[in-house]
Image: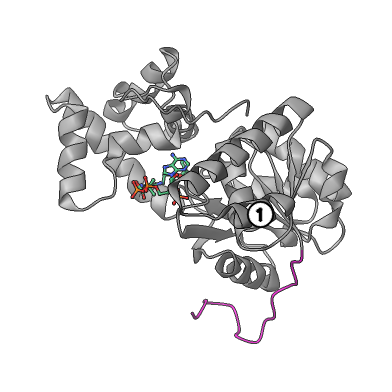
Amino acid sequence: AHVPGLGADIAPRRIDTAGVVGLGTMGRGIVMAIAAAGIPVVAVAQNEAQVAAAQKAVGTMWSKSVARGSLTQHAMDEQMARVTWSADMATLDAAQLVIEAVTEDPDIKADVFQELGRMARSGTILASNTSFLDLAMLADASGRPAEVAGMHFFNPAHVMRLLENVRTQRTAPDVVATIMAFGRKIGKLPVLSGACDGFIVNRMLAKRSREGFFLIEEGATPQAIDEAMTEFGFPMGPLALGDLAGLDVQAAARKARRSTMTERELRADFPEQMVAAGRLGQKTGAGWYAYDDKRKASDD
Ligand code: 3HC
């Protein structure tokens, strides 16, 4: 596909090994997608307990796929063998592309980018899975802005084909070419967005969620809204999708957008109320809906 501003002659960089830092829901899914595509991946979290929890959760998810018949035991063993689990950032030295998927907190992400900028080899691409934070700020923190880009995956990241790649004003053209090529290599459909509020998908989804909240205030039930939207053709309704993405993530995104929100949007603070009640969505077993099969996100 033609990418504006990107000559067809720009060769992508070679990625033999990828790295993922942050092993919550998204980090785990990204690790799974990369390993399933046959690429070695270094998976790093900040302590041994988080690494062990992630390794166990990924093993469980793949085992369920084996039980369902969508993955063979042999393929699962090969995928597992491609992942190097580590609590040491220095292990990322082996990677030519590092995807950051730590908590959506600007200070925490900036610290990680500063550390990556310091320790990653020159030429290593530093990508963030952020869905709403300022990529230019992360680029500054890294000290090597030309090598910083966004790679925004969608939950569940090993299943969803869409990948939003994001470039800042300073992202080098061959970095953009590389993340587009890498996205295709791991079986995704990459689209390119500028670094703007919400990128493409969340910009649209936020409006659907917002209207869902207003509809509840105006008398519709969450079930009715979700049923109507799924019947209409969306894979999930906006409330069920909030449960999948995490109501804590939705509340954090609202916080980041506060200054531009209307009175009415601020008042419809359902995600914040859910978080206060400990209902974060699928990962805690309850959000708008109750879940038996709790898909625990962890420790991130
Ligand atoms: N976590 C992990 N794996 C999951 C999962 C979950 N929450 N839900 C489904 N899966 C896996 C299943 O285990 C199964 O794996 P297998 O093929 O290896 O056996 C595979 O997905 C397919 O599952 P199902 O057979 O149950 O398939 P469905 O047809 O019900 O599809 C779905 C499930 C893919 C989640 C589908 O409902 C869908 O596409 N939903 C919309 C998801 C979406 O829009 N995500 C974006 C969220 S927003 C976001 O991430 C942005 C961020 O910035 C907040």
Residue 207 falls left or right of residue 124 = left
Q: Is residue 176 visible?
A: yes
Instruction: Please tell me whether the stretch drawn in magenta is mainly helix, strand or loop.
Output: loop
Q: Position of residue 222 (x, y in %)?
A: 21, 29
Q: Residue furthest bottom?
A: 9
Residue 27 falls left or right of residue 205 = right
* Disc 1 residue crowd, few under 14, some 14–19, many 20+, Cα 10 Å: many
Q: Position of residue 175 (x, y in %)?
A: 68, 67
Q: Position of residue 95 (x, y in %)?
A: 79, 57
Q: Is residue 202 magenta?
A: no
Q: How many marks?
A: 1
* Residue at image point 74% right, 72% down: 13
Q: Which residue is mark 1?
A: 79
Q: Amino acid at mark 1?
A: Gln
Residue 186 falls left or right of residue 46 = left
Which SS class for mark 1? helix
Residue 125 versus residue 85: which sits nearer the camera? 85
Residue 166 versus residue 76: which sits nearer the camera? 76
Q: Which residues are magenta?
A: 1-16
